[in-house]
Image: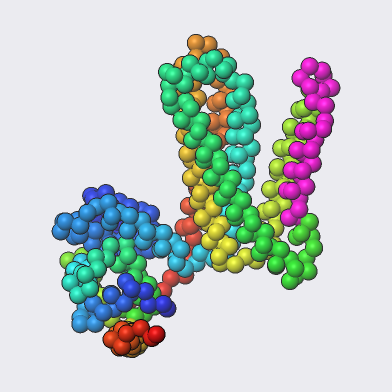
Amino acid sequence: MSDRPAVTSSWPARLLICYPPHWRARYGEELGLLITDLLDHGRPAVPMAADVLGGAVAAWISERGTGMTQRSRGALIAVLWNWVAFAAVAAWFGHDLGSYPTAIEAQQMMVSHPAVPDAYHLLMASGSVGVVATAVAAIAFAIDAAKHAWRQGRRSTFVLMAVPLVVAAVWLGGVRLLPFSEHTASGLALSVTWLLAGVAGIAVSTQAVVTVVKRSEFSERTWRIAAAAAAAVVAAMFVATGATITWGVVARTSLAHPGDASGWLVVTAILAVTTVRAVLALLGGRLEPAEHPAVA
Amino acid sequence: MDLTEPVVLVLTSLADGPKHGYALAKDIEWFSGTKLGPGTLYGALSRLDERGWIEALPAQDRRRPYRITAAGAESLARHLEAAQRVAATGLRRLELGPVP
């Protein structure tokens, strides 16, 4: 067995990085040589690259040890915490964008810097990808957790599973019903209190989900769904962070009076830090040593 | 293990002797007309290796040949016999024409 990467400069061979580390260590050099041989004999590069990527996906799916190890469980929980923090900050930032900059300034920027609306749309698209991936994984986890809790007779699991829904309902109900105001001290205090309550609610909900994940047993299929969802979420975080940085830089260089940049900088820093932490957690989980057959 | 088409093609190619990746790709293209991509070919090789139906030999000029094992040959024989029965039945029925 060789841990060396394939010695080749062809771009399809560089896609070997997409394979699981164990698989790449065992077959990477040989596959790299085959790619080079086929390219040298006139096989077109683009279909070959697509085939290599398809092989990488199949290798990840069939890789042994994708089941629940304690480390991969911890990695998914770490991705979840970082994603929740990221999404909360991004949502707050996106909500704040409505009043900053002014509509006229925004139109001027759209004309002079098309990258601004592009970045905004990219941010929205990546956010949607992250939310959909989270929802898909949440449904799969909820079904398995409910089955496990039913078999074990653990009613408390059902209570924990209800926490995020109850918290969201209560908080959104409060947003609609409570007398928030920026013009009175009491209304402003209520706004701040409710905002902090929302942050606490997010933390409590996430902890409830984490507890369910820690105490339940999940099928191999659910873990594969979770791994795919985590990868999609992390990719979305990465793209969204890039879009936010692009938007901020272009917007601030376009405005005659850009004002204080501290808010954008803080938001960007939080997005970047949570993204990096999620990427590291995901890679750490995937690099978990797995049981592999002896190489003949 | 399901014998997918790439797996059957690889086992069939190795049935007459050990081959490395490029030799496999060329041989399979010659006898079946199928141009297996490198990802597909090594996907099949890794599954067969894991199953013990082929085994890796020492590398020659950095290219590692594989040979079929007894278990792999037996599985291929069973699969091809079943496929032969299906093919013979299908051809015979086509010669007789559709049942009215």
Residue pictured at 38% horizontal, 86% vertical: B99
**In the picture provided, is A192 more to the left or to the right than A107?**
right
Residue pictured at 24% horizontal, 68% vertical: B34
Point out the image quarter for the N terminus of chain A: bottom left
> Taken as a whole, is the magenta stretch helix, strand or loop?
helix
Q: Is residue B10 visible?
A: yes
Viewer-nearest residue: A12 or B55: A12
In the rendering, at what x and y percent does residue A28 appear?
A: 31, 61
In the rendering, at what x and y percent does residue A87 appear?
A: 60, 39
Residue pictured at 70% horizontal, 58% vertical: A212
**In the picture provided, is B82 more to the left or to the right than B18?**
right
Viewer-nearest residue: A262 or B48: B48
Q: Is residue A214 visible?
A: no
Q: With respect to residue B49, does A49 lie above or below?
A: above
Q: In which quarter of the image is residue A18?
A: bottom left
Question: Which region of the structure is painted magenta?
Answer: A160-187
Viewer-nearest residue: A69 or A169: A169
Viewer-nearest residue: A98 or A27: A98
Q: Residue at the left extreme?
A: A41
Residue pictured at 58% horizontal, 62% vertical: A222
**In the picture provided, is A3 more to the left or to the right than A292?**
left
- For the image, the number of numbered tags is 0
Is residue A169 a member of the stretch shown in magenta?
yes
Is residue A14 a member of the stretch shown in magenta?
no
Point out the image quarter for the C terminus of chain A: bottom left
In the rendering, at what x and y percent does residue A70 appear?
A: 59, 62
Q: Quadrant of residue A169?
A: top right
Q: Residue at the top extreme?
A: A256
In the rendering, at what x and y percent does residue A78 appear?
A: 59, 49
Q: With respect to residue B63, does B82 lie above or below?
A: below
